[in-house]
Image (tube, rainbow, N blue to C red):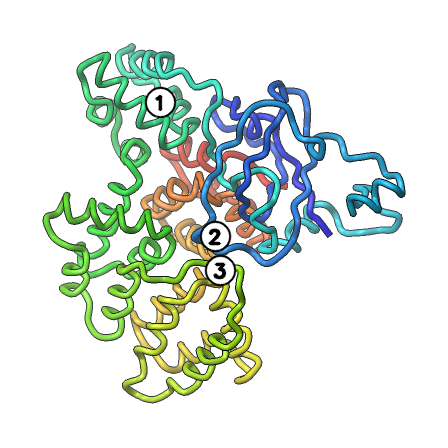
């Protein structure tokens, strides 16, 4: 049956602005593509949106689709009247059930990971294109925040965490044209610490931010393999290729060369294969023959010298195909492929392969686990929190929030409130957006 998403009018309209409030909102479960038109004045309305249920789409198709303004389609708004003729024609279920059933929150979480890419509202990011965007007003507000008596950190965070990455670049260019000063440099001079780092990350193009994170992971006191897997395995192919091009331009060396210098053996082969971006695109055609071949190949790759089989299959096949391979492998062997990885590989290679398998199975859950790890440290890993929240804020952060609440029994918003201190908490909470029921 379809799950229902209870949405905040501020999020749907893109009009919400100001410091993040601990409002309660029910979030949808997985990503969706087609944009949904919505009413131009939804300030006083709440909407129940149905989402068809099926296996989650390929993670590389989890991209943002802008929500256009205008009149709402007929199926958005108050649910249709519950007449027999309408139920037969549309197969729409009434929100009210004739018998006891789980709460709406439990129902949504029970379907987590199953929402089809044709689900209701275009993106599962918390940050969307601001519909009332005025570059002149934003430039003036930032100027006042920097030049006034004392730095207005709230105003800076409010502007930058309520604009899409494209709109932030427009603001940056307009600031340069109007003031003959670089916005990034001006904000760096006005801020410090973790808040400065978050603001810099928000203003830099995503490819530049990823390239710097990848460089740091490869060069600082030994490779940070988890960060390398995160960037190489979760970015869509065009994003990854742009990141690697920026890496070469900024550091005058190919990322592959740094990978070869920092790693060796199977781990090096794995990272180089991911960096090539040769993974097959998701397909509507199910190739059962290829799935059977891959299962047999993995079963036979239990001898020294066969490690490349695991690397080849896990880095070239599309995620939907690999989930079928994982399921068939477990039916044939009686255990998940992750158990074989633990028995067959060791050290950094084992950790990297298990992380990759986690990304393949459920990307939002992978990020939920990473956020939880970052928050459980004695001092929260603000760099990891910043990297994940910014990079997923326009992609699937709502799904990550739901997975976090489902697994850990506490909302991501509350966890950030409790663990993070200082000015950077304001920005992280603004990216997270809201409390989950």
Give left or right: position of 80 versus 269: right
Whole-angstrom CA distance, mark 3 to mark 2, is 27 Å
Q: Which residue is mark 3?
A: 283
Secondary structure found at label 1:
helix
In this view, the mark in front (3 or 2): 3
Return the residue nearer the eye: 335 or 416: 335
Q: Going from the N terminus, do you reach mark 3 or mark 2 first? A: 3
Location of the C terminus (image quadrant): top right
Residue that numbered label 1 is attached to: 156
Do residues under tags 1 and 3 come within 8 Å of each other at their CB atoms?
Answer: no
Residue 276 place in picture, x, y as percent: 27, 60
Q: What is the secondary structure assignment of the residue under circle 2? A: helix
The residue at which mark 2 appears reads as: 368
Q: Is residue 380 above or below residue 130?
A: below
The residue sitting at 28% across, 23% down in the picture is 172
Residue 425 percent across, percent down from the top left: 41, 35
Q: Is residue 164 above or below residue 83?
A: above
The residue located at (25%, 70%) in the rendering is 269
Residue 129 falls left or right of residue 308 = right
- Residue 180 vs residue 403, the one in the foreground: 180
Q: Nearer the viewer, mark 1 or mark 3?
A: 3
> Which of pointers 1 and 2 lies earlier in the amino acid sequence?
1
Q: Is residue 256 left or right of residue 412?
A: left
Q: Residue at x 43, y 19 (%)?
A: 133
Q: Place residue 36 in its image quadrant.
A: top right
Marks 2 and 1: in contact by CB < 8 Å? no
């Amino acid at each position: 049956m379809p799950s229902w998403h209870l949405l905040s009018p501020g999020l749907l309209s893109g009009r919400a602005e100001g410091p993040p409030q601990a409002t309660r909102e029910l979030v949808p479960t997985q990503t969706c593509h087609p944009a949904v038109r919505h009413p131009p004045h939804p300030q006083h309305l709440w909407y129940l949106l149905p989402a068809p249920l099926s296996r989650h789409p390929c993670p590389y198709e989890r991209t943002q689709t802008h929500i256009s303004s205008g009149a709402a389609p007929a199926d958005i708004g108050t649910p249709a009247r519950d007449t027999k003729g309408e139920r037969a024609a549309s197969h729409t279920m009434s929100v009210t059930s004739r018998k006891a059933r789980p709460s709406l929150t439990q129902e949504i979480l029970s379907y987590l990971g199953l929402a089809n890419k044709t689900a209701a509202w275009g993106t599962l990011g918390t940050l969307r294109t601001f519909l009332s965007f005025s570059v002149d007003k934003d430039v003036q507000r930032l100027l006042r925040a920097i030049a006034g008596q004392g730095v207005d950190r709230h105003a800076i965070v409010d502007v930058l965490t309520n604009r899409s990455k494209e709109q932030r670049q427009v603001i940056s260019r307009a600031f340069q044209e109007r003031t003959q000063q670089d916005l990034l440099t001006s904000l760096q001079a006005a801020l410090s610490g973790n808040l400065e780092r978050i603001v810099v990350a928000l203003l830099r193009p995503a490819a530049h931010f990823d390239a710097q994170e990848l460089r740091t992971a490869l060069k600082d006191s030994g490779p940070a393999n988890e960060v390398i897997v995160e960037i190489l395995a979760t970015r869509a192919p065009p994003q990854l290729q742009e990141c690697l091009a920026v890496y070469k331009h900024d550091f005058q060396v190919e990322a592959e060369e740094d990978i070869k210098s920092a790693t060796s053996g199977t781990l090096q082969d794995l990272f180089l294969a991911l960096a090539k971006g040769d993974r097959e695109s998701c397909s509507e055609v199910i190739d059962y023959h290829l799935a059977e071949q891959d299962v047999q190949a993995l079963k036979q790759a239990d001898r020294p010298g066969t490690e490349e089989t695991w690397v080849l299959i896990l880095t070239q096949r599309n995620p939907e195909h690999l989930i079928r391979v994982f399921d068939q492998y477990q039916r044939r062997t009686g255990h998940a492929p992750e158990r074989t990885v633990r028995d067959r590989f060791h050290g950094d290679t084992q950790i990297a392969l298990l992380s990759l398998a986690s990304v393949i199975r459920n990307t939002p859950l992978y990020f939920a686990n990473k956020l939880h790890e970052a928050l459980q440290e004695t001092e929260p890993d603000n760099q990891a929190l910043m990297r994940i929240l910014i990079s997923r804020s326009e992609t699937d952060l709502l799904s990550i929030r739901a997975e976090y609440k489902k697994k850990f029994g506490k909302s991501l918003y509350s966890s950030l409130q409790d663990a993070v201190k200082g000015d950077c908490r304001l920005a992280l909470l603004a990216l997270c957006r809201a409390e989950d029921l």
